[in-house]
Image: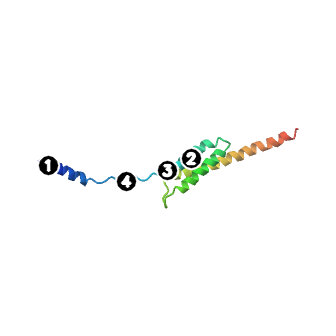
Amino acid sequence: MNLDNEEKQEEGARMLPDRPAAPAANHMALASMILGIVSFFGICCCGVGGIVTGSLAMILGLLSRTGEKTETRAMAGIITGAVSVILGAAVIILFLIVNIPAFFAGLGGY
C-alpha cells in the first residue's frame, strides 16, 4: 500500500505544470532608466551634466528596444532623459543671458 502511494505521488509530481521561464532582463533599459533619473541631478552642474547623462539615457533607451516592443523602463529613461536635456539646455541659455552682459559691462571700466 505504501508503494502505491509513492507511485501516485511521483505521477502527481510529473503532472504538475512547469513554471514559465522568467523573461530575460533587459539591462540596457534599466541603465537607461537609472541614467535618466541621475540626469536630473546633473542639471545642477551648469546644465552640462544633465545634457550628457540625459543624452546617454535616451540613446540606451532607444537601443534597448526589442522589435516593436519598448519596455516601460526604457520609456522612462527616454522621457526623463529628454526632459533633462531640455532643462539642461535652458539652464545653459539662462546662464549665458544673465552673465554675458555682466561680463561685457565689467570690461568697459578698465
Disc 1 is placed on an element classified as helix
The kind of residue tagged 4 is Ala
The kind of residue tagged 3 is His
The CA distance from mark 1 to mark 3 is 49 Å
The CA distance from mark 2 to mark 3 is 12 Å
Q: Which residue is mark 2?
A: 35
Q: Which residue is mark 4?
A: 21
Q: Nearer the viewer, mark 4 or mark 2?
A: 4
Q: Nearer the viewer, mark 2 or mark 3?
A: 3
Contact? badges 4 and 1 (CB < 8 Å): no
Disc 3 is placed on an element classified as helix
Which of these two is toward me, 54 or 3?
Answer: 3
Residue 27: assigned label: 3
N-terminal-most mark, 4 or 3 = 4
N-terminal-most mark, 4 or 1 = 1
Is 2 on the left-hand or right-hand side of 93?
left
Q: Which residue is mark 1?
A: 3
The kind of residue tagged 1 is Leu
